[in-house]
Image (cartoon, rainbow, N blue to C red):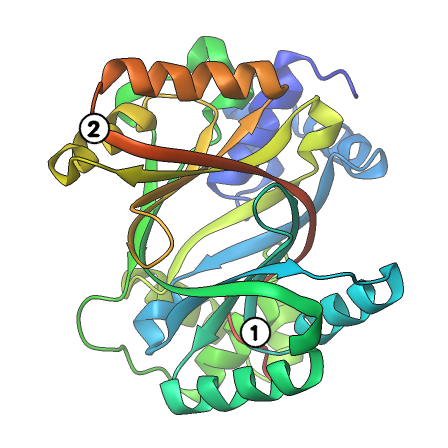
Amino acid sequence: MEKLDLKDRKILYQLDLNCRQSNTHIGKKVGLSKEVVNYRIKRMRDIGIINGFWTAINSLKLGYYACRIYINFLDVSSDIKNEIIRYFKNYKNVWTLHSAKGPVDLEVVLWVDDIYNFNQFWNKTLDRYGNHFEKYEVSILTQVTCLKKSYLILDDYEKSDREFYTINCSGNPVTIDELDYRILNEIATNARIPLVKLAEKSNSSSQTINYKIKNLMKKGIILAFRVGIDISKLGLRNCMIDIYLKDHTKGIQIENYVKGNPYVENIMDMTIGWCDLNFELMVKNIDSLTQIIEDIDSKFPGAIRKTNFWMAHKIHKERWLPELY
């Protein structure tokens, strides 16, 4: 576990709100000079707390759906398991890929633009690896509410200012051109790339790229420029809680209550299949996780039929846009 002071945490928080803002602007917000911000960011990268910069892209607005596949393995060796992970990791339409500990061994979230094509891909997957799956379940994710990383600034956050952005599959798809997609493809996993380099890679001018990025933001396709953090170095673990409701009328109330917890990052509040409400949070240990679950149960007696939890063991891939080959 690495020790960070409040200034480091505030820098991380600002980077997660907008990692493309200049270090000068970050310095003004946290009370440090540009040079000190430069040093602190470099240090956090060197020790592995910062592991990259990524862009939150609302690919649902581009006509994609999000399919979640939860897989339990059956008598697989480490070699076979790693082969299956590589198989999914190399598939261009994978959004997130997590190994987990709990009722799920592997979570795969796919960008799907055609149900028939998805069915073909999944049939090929089962032909190849189906005998290594004890069971699997497919669900459709239709809305995600993303919250700010308030756990970085516990003494300085407001419960009423937790919501960051929401993505969902409502409305008609937005049309973008080839240059738009090439820009998104580059910044998906390199959100801090300078305009000059992005222009060179896209064979365009910096002015055009700047205009295109602002337009993609205006259309709600680019939602935020964020920072990747290895939370294990902060003494935290990534956990998912699945809630199965007995009283569906309490769903929104539970969601609003959960939003007030500074350790909750994402709420999957509209799903078809698997569970009724699913949220991702950072916990220090099992005791703190159990306390959160018990707290929700006590606040909403009789509303919840069942609660499951599982730990994300390792993140193998996270990319908010299908890869452009």
In the image, 322 versus 176, the foreground residue is 322
Q: Measuring 64% from the left and 78% from the top, which residue is drawn there? A: 91
Residue 109 seen in the current view: yes
Q: Spatial distance from mark 1 to mark 2, Cα to Cα?
A: 43 Å
**Badge 1 local density, few (<14 within 10 Å), some, or many (20+)?**
many
Q: Is residue 309 above or below residue 134?
A: above
- Of tags 1 and 2, the one toward the viewer is 2
Residue 221, image x, y percentages: 36, 65
| Left or right of 230, for residue 306 | left
Quadrant location of the N terminus in the rendered image: top right
Residue 100, image x, y percentages: 65, 46
- The numbered disc on residue 185 is 1
| Left or right of 2, for residue 129 | left
- The numbered disc on residue 64 is none
Dot 1 amino acid type: Asn
Q: Is residue 179 above or below residue 243?
A: below
Quadrant location of the C terminus in the rendered image: bottom right
Element type at marker 1? helix
Residue 32 seen in the current view: no
Q: Measuring 54% from the left and 80% from the top, which residue is drawn there? A: 182
Residue 294, image x, y percentages: 40, 16
Q: Measuring 43% from the left and 68% from the top, which residue is drawn there? A: 67
In the image, 183 versus 313, the foreground residue is 313
- N-term mark: 1 or 2: 1
Q: Measuring 52% from the left and 21% from the top, which residue is drawn there? A: 289
Label 2 sits on residue = 303
In the image, 115 versus 213, the foreground residue is 115
| Pointer 1 with pointer 2, Cβ within 8 A | no
Element type at marker 2? loop
Q: Is residue 278 above or below residue 154?
A: below
